[in-house]
Amino acid sequence: MSRLLPRIKGPGKGYPFITALVILGFILLAGCSLHSTGGHEGTSRIPPGYGLNDGRLAVHFLDVGQGDSALILYNGTTILIDAGEADAGPGIVSYLKGQGVRDIDILIATHPHSDHIGGMQDILMNFHVRSVIDSGMPHTTTTYQKFLETIDRKNITYSTVKQGDSFNPAPGLVFLVLSGPGGSKEQDLNDGSIVLRVTYGQVSVLFESDAGITAEDSMIDSGLPLESQVLKVAHHGSPHGTGRAFLERIRPEVAIISVGADNPYNFPAEDTVVRLENTGTLQFRTDTAGNVVVRTDGMAFSVETARSGIYPFAVSTLASAQV
């Protein structure tokens, strides 16, 4: 299967008013965040006039247990990244339909582990999927084989990507591939995960899938832009990813950890949590917060959780991707 997706390419007045302007300018220059309580430790109450961002881009990090799935909605374009384990499939289908989704423009499988593609069959059977992006890494499980067979049977456009590739699903929305398969059959499936930086205006969201330190080092060495306000933490908070050097390059304000309650791996690992805390990153976990939704107008963004309220953020000074 080699049908390639289009657009993929290589690498008041008076003193009170003045005082308010000074304070606002200080916040923007410092890249400070404005948070609500929402029952989240370490946050302060939402200032008057701040709340849910109603911008065009919404990223839904779904609570699928010990797995990954994220829905991106932008100006009529629908993209789904991963679909959790097989038992998460029906719930994802229900959630998408609740969001008014009928067609999926791009379905992305970051790598062929079952906690990322297990629910793909339900997605493929319940929605009109226009195109699929896959890591293309060899894997012989029944789950992965059925995934490929269904794509072929439905004649869905299929493509693979590599580090440095970029594509524009819709005007103003840029996807940059920061990492992907290295071409070696012996490559670890996690380190071969597709890592994406999604940029809209001045706001970027980085999806790290299950990439480990080796892949992170490659991304740092690549010279590609990594800075992002929102980070989907690697491998459910594993201690073997989301390293200090990588975090220093990303400088995230918010971290989303997709993780199952009482999982047998004790994820997120304490080391990972501490590394995020040391960078001043506000953390949201799907096992405690439920679904987490990031909304942005390209200039500012907000985080809304199913269980703990809304957290608005001022724009930091991060540069948008130039790809």
Image (spheres, helix red, strand yellow):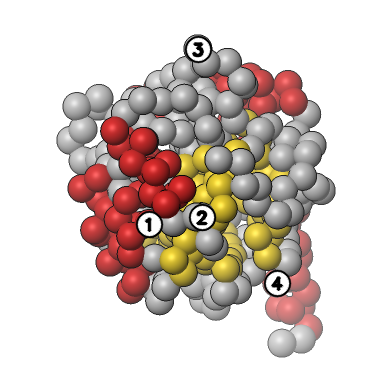
Distance from Cα at disc 1 to Cα at disc 3: 29 Å
Q: Position of residue 267 (x, y in %)?
A: 30, 30
Distance from Cα at disc 1 to Cα at disc 2: 10 Å
Q: Is residue 40 left or right of residue 224?
A: left
Question: Does dot 3 land on a helix, a strand or a loop?
Answer: loop
Label 2 packing within 10 angstroms: few (<14), some (14-19), many (20+): some
Q: Earlier in the sequence, mark 4 or mark 2?
A: 4
Label 1 packing within 10 angstroms: few (<14), some (14-19), many (20+): some
Distance from Cα at disc 2 to Cα at disc 3: 28 Å
Is residue 221 placed above or below 16 in the rendered structure?
A: above
- According to the picture, the residue beneath numbered tag 3 turns out to be 186
Front-most of residues 172 and 240: 172
Q: Earlier in the sequence, mark 1 or mark 4?
A: 4
The label on residue 20 is 4
Q: Toward which corner of the image does residue 38 lie, by quadrant?
A: bottom left
Label 3 packing within 10 angstroms: few (<14), some (14-19), many (20+): few
